[in-house]
Amino acid sequence: MSANGELKNVPTIKAYKNPDWLGSPTSRHIRIMCELYEPMKRLDDNNIDNYFIIVGSHLVMDPEDRVKHINGLEQQLKKITAEEEVEAVQAKLRFAKKMQNMDKFYVMARELGEKLGKWNRERAAIGKPSYNVSTGGGPGIMEAANRGAHEAGDTTLGFGASRPEWGSLNRYVSNHGAFEFHYFFMRKFWMAYKCMGLVVMPGGFGSLDELFEMLVLLQTKKISHPMPIILLGAEFWKKAINFDYLLECGMLTQSHLDMLVFKDSAEDAFQYLVENVRKAEESGETEQVQSAKRRRLENKPSVPSTPSKKDK
């Protein structure tokens, strides 16, 4: 009612434009569906047929940047006097020097990303299905792999997960390939759905989670097509996870271990991935996989084959 006592028209807002409604617990299913269908449309619109996922620690750095970082900390130590500040900077310096040996994997990830990016562009030029480089979109190994593909001139993907300590996705993720998920299970879904190969470099809980998640999906036939899983850095992985002991105890069988392959260079990992793609395409398996995935997302039944005379 206005000041003079007249009734005023009631303002309204459409439900799908109401942020309070869309952000409420009641609308959770709508938000989940958005995280299913928006990526599907964007991937289709940009002709992203398949991708390789490359994961690893967010803590590694470009070796040149690491040297600059260490030099900066050493200069900082010379200027501060407060005991607490000195201890904090010394701890950062010790950690930075400890990580230097792991920075070789940044170089390896960048090299692998570049090789895959060039190979994918060559395929695109002759009309073959794409296999883009994809990561979690963060720093470290993820940045390096995206960087390599970006430097090769290819579209590069990042599946982010609202990590406040990382901020936005790394600058080497293509604009149309940048995804951020609120629901971690939807991020996992899209990282797996079009994945045709996983490369795992040294990392912590996140990398281990992505490795074992994919292994379980393969073991339980939720991923029914053959998919190479490469552990890059054989010495690290054989120390980090005692696969032989798990086999000895009967917790794993040889068939489980056969799902893994150990490599020590970007070139070896690249050749292994490319060879697997070649075999899948020659067998017709790739086309069958893509058709099945599309039907499942769109909830379409399989097209029945023409019955033979014997069936009639």
Image (cartoon, helix red, strand yellow):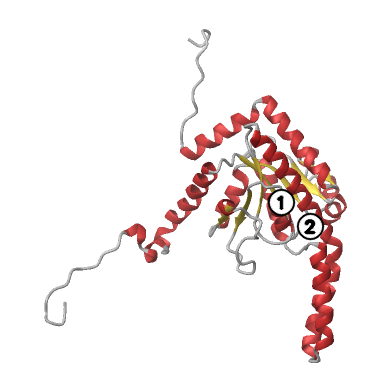
Q: Residue at x 71, y 34 (%)?
A: 277
Residue with the mark numbered 1: 151
| Residue nearer the viewer, 298 or 168 | 168
Q: Residues within 10 Å of mark 2 (few under 14, many from 20)?
A: many
Identify the amino acid type marked 2. Answer: Tyr
Direction from residue 33 to residue 225 in the image, left or right: right
Quarter the N terminus occupies: bottom left
Residue 62 image point, x, y percent? 79, 62
| Residue nearer the viewer, 32 or 212 | 32
Q: Secondary structure at mark 2?
A: helix
Quadrant of the image occupied by residue 166: bottom right
Q: Residue at x 81, y 47 (%)?
A: 266
Q: Is residue 253 visible?
A: no
Residue 9: give its label. none
Residue 88 in the image: above or below residue 51 = below
Q: Residues within 10 Å of mark 1 (few under 14, many from 20)?
A: some
Q: Earlier in the sequence, mark 1 or mark 2?
A: 2
Count of numbered circles in the view: 2
Residue 20 image point, x, y percent? 38, 66
Give the distance between the C-alpha atoms of the residues marked 1 and 2, in whole angstroms: 15 Å
Residue 223 in the image: above or below residue 301 = below
Identify the amino acid type marked 1. Answer: Glu
Q: Residue at x 49, y 22 (%)?
A: 304
Residue 42 image point, x, y percent? 52, 47
| Residue nearer the viewer, 152 or 24 | 152
Direction from residue 21 to residue 154 in the image, left or right: right
Residue with the mark numbered 2: 106
Q: Residue furthest left?
A: 5
Q: Residue furthest bottom?
A: 82
Q: Residue at x 85, y 46 (%)?
A: 248
Q: Secondary structure at mark 1?
A: helix
